[in-house]
Image (cartoon, rainbow, N blue to C red):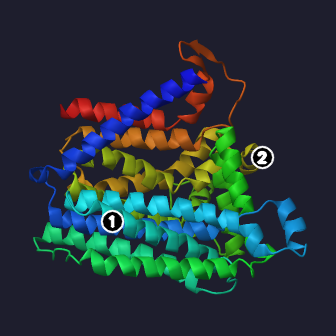
Amino acid sequence: MLTHLYTLLWITLIYGGAFASEVSRISAAPAAGTVPVERQWIAAAVLLACAGLGWMSLRALGPLLVTPAEQVWGLSSPIDRLEWLLPRFSLLLAGGTLAGAAAAGLAVFLATAGGSLALAAVGGGCLGAAFIAGGVAAQNTAGSKWPDVAGTLLLAAGVLAAAVMVAAHFGGWRLPRAGTIPGVILLPIFLAVAAGAVTLGARSLRRVDRIALGAGTDLAGALVTATVSLDPSLLTRMIEYRRWRRIGRVPTGRLRPAPPGIPGRTWALLQADVRRSGRRPLALSAWAGLALAQYALFVVAPSLAGMARLAGTYLAAGAFTAGLRTISHSDGLRRALGGSDRALRMIHLAIPAAAAALWWILTRPAGGPSTGPMEILLLSGVVAAVYRAATRPPIDYSAPVVETPFGLLPLGLVLQLVRGPDVLGGVLVLQILWNR
């Protein structure tokens, strides 16, 4: 155990030190393209977007969770629900406070490189506690739309701030600098907001019902199982199931006839995949959001834009691989459709490849140093990585184990988990060598 802890400590020090060094370099080098005013805007945009995504995640999970046995015995017994749920509520508040303090402190450090970190940590901790308490209060509001609207507004505000910053940079406009408000005024406001939210959340514990407590149990169970089993597909399938259950039904319609020269079967499968992608608005939103994030990163840290462009292309294309993953993971579906497995996979690779190519062209002005004819090779490598990740077979836990000086290493399992990202890593190395 001590050997493993020693190894983990060194890994943390190495990668943590590299991250801290990169953060210090970016914050202390405005000549490399980082403008303090733009740093303030991007810090605000990141905080707002993370708050919106975090709120949506809290809504999906609970945040209060109890086991099925506790739902049956606890909610059917004449016990004080406030006393029963208060320890969980306290742990959630502690985690939210620490996360808010860390996020606010990092944002102030990157945005100002010398702001009041203590005030930012206190304010962020208060807002983090209010965030968690508000999520608990909203957990027992079935049928109310304000919790979902709140998360959407936070995310939209972050996107708008990033879009304004990018437009101002490329348009040559001057953005206003964030004003400074004395901490004597801000600190009581933060404390009042946190106290009010915590009081509201604590009062809602007495009224929480079984449906509210069990709303995110299946998703939390899938998350734990996927983490223990090292199989992310378990979580993605649960998310997909919840998404289709929320839709309920989809409109039907006839497929258009195939143009001359294209087999009708191929054209029908391609149209079906296009319709499947159109019924996934989150995939389109993620595709556009990644493009905006690429431009924002180019403005703030142009030295990282080249590598981020490859990773962004991989993620943008991966959002459209639902059809390819479905075909690859279902032997029965492939037998029902007929044809060779390779032909079916190539048909369903067309939409992710088109999404990757369009995203690559759209982000060309924010792609960092030009790579010339290598761009086609890099894009092809990213598409190959997407295909390799989407067609990954189920995890084989009987893979061989290798003896190392640090203990047994499940090399076969690791190779299965990095299927897809391994090709992307090779493409990143190729780009670095070419630019040098």
Between circles 2 and 1, the one closer to the viewer is: 1
Quarter of the view holding residue 272: bottom right
Is 312 placed above or below 159 here? above
Task: Give the residue at x 69% y 39%.
Answer: 229
For the N terminus, which image quadrant?
top right
Amino acid beneath label 1: Ala
Counting from the top left corner in percent of width and height, residue 2 is at: 57, 23
Q: Can residue 214 be seen in this view?
A: no
Q: Which of 69 and 146 is in front in this view?
A: 69
Q: Which of 23 and 221 is in front in this view?
A: 23
- The mark found on residue 120 in the picture is 1
Amino acid beneath label 2: Gly
Counting from the top left corner in percent of width and height, residue 197 is at: 54, 79
Q: In this view, does 337 lie to the left or right of 188?
A: right
Q: Which of 279 and 114 is in front in this view?
A: 114
Quarter of the view holding residue 345: top right
Counting from the top left corner in percent of width and height, residue 121 is at: 37, 62
Counting from the top left corner in percent of width and height, residue 71 is at: 84, 66
C-alpha separation, residue under disc 2 versus residue under disc 1: 56 Å
Q: What element carries label 1?
A: helix
Q: Is residue 10 visible?
A: yes
